[in-house]
Image (cartoon, rainbow, N blue to C red):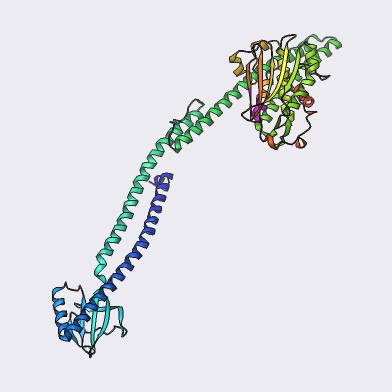
């Protein structure tokens, strides 16, 4: 019982009951005031009418006529309906239903409220006094308690309304609590299943439902994201274990061979250099993962400045021209003028460099690679890198941005499968996405970047991007996702 009273459903129900009672009080207070004023005014008007009628009888028929009229009226009316008294100059009663003139009656005329003895009982009355010619005195009154039954009915009705409101509130609290417990039990079972490791459970959330259904849909979206992240972490862990196994196995094999064979110093130093290369490969993998983790957290948003995407892409193409010429590939850049975006120039340069690097890696010898920077009608800037290589299948297009994923066409080529993952992370950080499409032949990689407020862009507030692309290339070297030498900078991974 205590748990039921402490439940949120009962708290809500009792709150509505209290609000309803307050509303009844606010409604009854002015109604009661209006009732009192109306009854008082009506009582005074009746006394004035009765007094005026008796005064006219006195003027027409004299004292004896008024005395006879009062006796007749008293005999016909209900006991206690009216208070009538006619007295002479010495206040001696001549006619009426009152045995003596009230001593506590004020001398001033008009209406007064006094206590009088009626049928041997003190009664609160409202009386009106009038002076008649010949020093006669007239008293007309009514019992104040005449309307008491109506007042009692009013209070009985108000009390009954409060009682009904309380009963309905308690019953409503019970029903609401039962309904909420059913819904909460469904949520509890789902959460319990998830705690046991089954991430496929979802809350029932019919479309167009109530607030709890809206909450359920929100929780389901959160569970979808958690499941996606969980599987992503598991896949990354598996990929890390797979990619680290080879360099670590090679490193162990070399060291074990050195320990067993004890070769000459030149051969020993050669094996040591190879072991250092294996260690560097492992370090590059972890550097790339740390960079992706830094991007995923969104910490780099604090360093956003105005960047000209067209200028940044042109600089990346210029730096990759020597590598393209070595492979006999035509590398070109096309834009429609300045393309201002708000972003991190180093990350954007690294993303564009990754796309160009991949295009040069898979483009056919003597082929073409084009870079285009175009505005879109949906408020995005599109940086497209297209090649005429073998391309990838639709299934691989969905998997290519995953970390450590390497398709069939990448077998035997350098890299660890983090290049497109970094591009996708940078695009998400900048409010956009990475889209992979067919170029017939080849692949079109579209980097979409959100334009926050292009009209307010001023070149003088932008950061100089002339050093962004070389700096990005150096970081790509550390991450091991590059394969070409660009203007004297080794990109071999």
Front residue of 392/460: it is 460
Residue 391 in the figure: left or right of residue 119:
right
Residue 92 screen position, x and y as percent? 20, 88
Magenta part of the chain: 424-434
Against 240, residue 265 (above or below) is above
- Looking at the image, which residue is at 47% across and 35% down? 214
Residue 347 screen position, x and y as percent? 72, 28
Residue 409: name its quadrant: top right
Asked if the magenta segment contains residue 376, the reply would be no
Front residue of 353/17: it is 353
- Looking at the image, which residue is at 66% across and 19% down? 445
Residue 226 screen position, x and y as percent? 56, 29
Residue 288 screen position, x and y as percent? 71, 24
Asked if the magenta segment contains residue 432, the reply would be yes
Quarter holding the C terminus?
A: top right
Q: Residue furthest front?
A: 60
- Looking at the image, which residue is at 26% across and 67% down? 148
Residue 473 in the figure: left or right of residue 143:
right
Against 258, residue 64 (above or below) is below
């Amino acid at each position: 019982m205590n748990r039921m009273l402490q439940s949120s459903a009962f708290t809500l129900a009792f709150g509505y009951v209290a609000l309803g009672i307050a509303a009844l009080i606010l409604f009854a207070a002015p109604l009661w005031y209006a009732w009192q004023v109306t009854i008082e005014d009506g009582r005074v008007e009746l006394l004035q009418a009765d007094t005026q009628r008796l005064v006219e009888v006195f003027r027409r028929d004299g004292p004896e006529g008024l005395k006879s009229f009062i006796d007749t009226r008293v005999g016909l009316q209900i006991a206690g309906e009216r208070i009538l008294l006619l007295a002479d100059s010495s206040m001696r009663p001549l006619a009426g239903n009152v045995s003596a003139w009230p001593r506590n009656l004020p001398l001033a005329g008009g209406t007064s409220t006094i206590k009088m003895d009626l049928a041997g009982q003190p009664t609160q009355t409202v009386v009106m006094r009038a002076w008649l010619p010949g020093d006669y005195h007239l008293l007309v009154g009514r019992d104040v308690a005449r309307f008491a039954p109506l007042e009692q009915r009013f209070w009985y009705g108000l009390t009954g309304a409060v009682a009904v409101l309380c009963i309905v509130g308690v019953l409503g609290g019970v029903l609401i609590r039962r309904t909420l417990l059913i819904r909460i039990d469904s949520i509890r079972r789902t959460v319990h299943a998830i705690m046991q490791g089954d991430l496929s459970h979802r809350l029932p959330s019919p479309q167009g439902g109530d607030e709890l259904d809206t909450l359920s849909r929100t929780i389901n979206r959160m569970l979808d994201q958690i499941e996606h992240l969980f599987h992503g972490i598991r896949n990354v862990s598996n990929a890390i274990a797979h990619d680290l196994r080879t360099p670590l196995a090679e490193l162990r094999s070399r060291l074990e061979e050195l320990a067993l064979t004890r070769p000459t110093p030149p051969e020993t130093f050669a094996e040591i250099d190879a072991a250092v290369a294996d260690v560097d490969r492992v370090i590059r993998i972890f550097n790339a993962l740390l960079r992706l983790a830094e991007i995923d957290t969104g910490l780099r948003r604090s360093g956003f400045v105005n960047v000209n995407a067209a200028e940044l892409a042109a600089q990346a193409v210029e730096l990759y021209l020597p590598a393209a010429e070595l492979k006999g590939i035509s590398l070109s850049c096309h834009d429609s003028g300045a393309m201002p975006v708000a972003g991190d120039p180093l990350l954007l340069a690294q993303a564009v460099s990754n796309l160009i690097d991949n295009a040069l890696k898979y483009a056919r010898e003597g082929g073409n690679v084009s870079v285009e920077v175009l505005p879109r009608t949906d408020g995005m800037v599109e940086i497209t890198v297209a090649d005429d290589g073998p391309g990838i299948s639709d299934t691989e297009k969905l998997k290519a941005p995953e970390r450590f994923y390497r398709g069939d066409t990448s077998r035997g080529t350098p890299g660890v499968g983090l290049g497109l993952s970094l591009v996708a992370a940078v695009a998400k950080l900048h409010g956009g996405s990475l889209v992979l499409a067919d170029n017939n032949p080849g692949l079109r990689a579209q980097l979409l970047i959100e334009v926050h407020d292009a009209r307010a862009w001023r070149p003088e507030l932008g950061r100089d991007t002339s050093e962004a692309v070389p700096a990005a290339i150096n970081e790509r070297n550390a991450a091991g996702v590059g394969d070409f030498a660009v203007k004297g900078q080794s990109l071999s991974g």
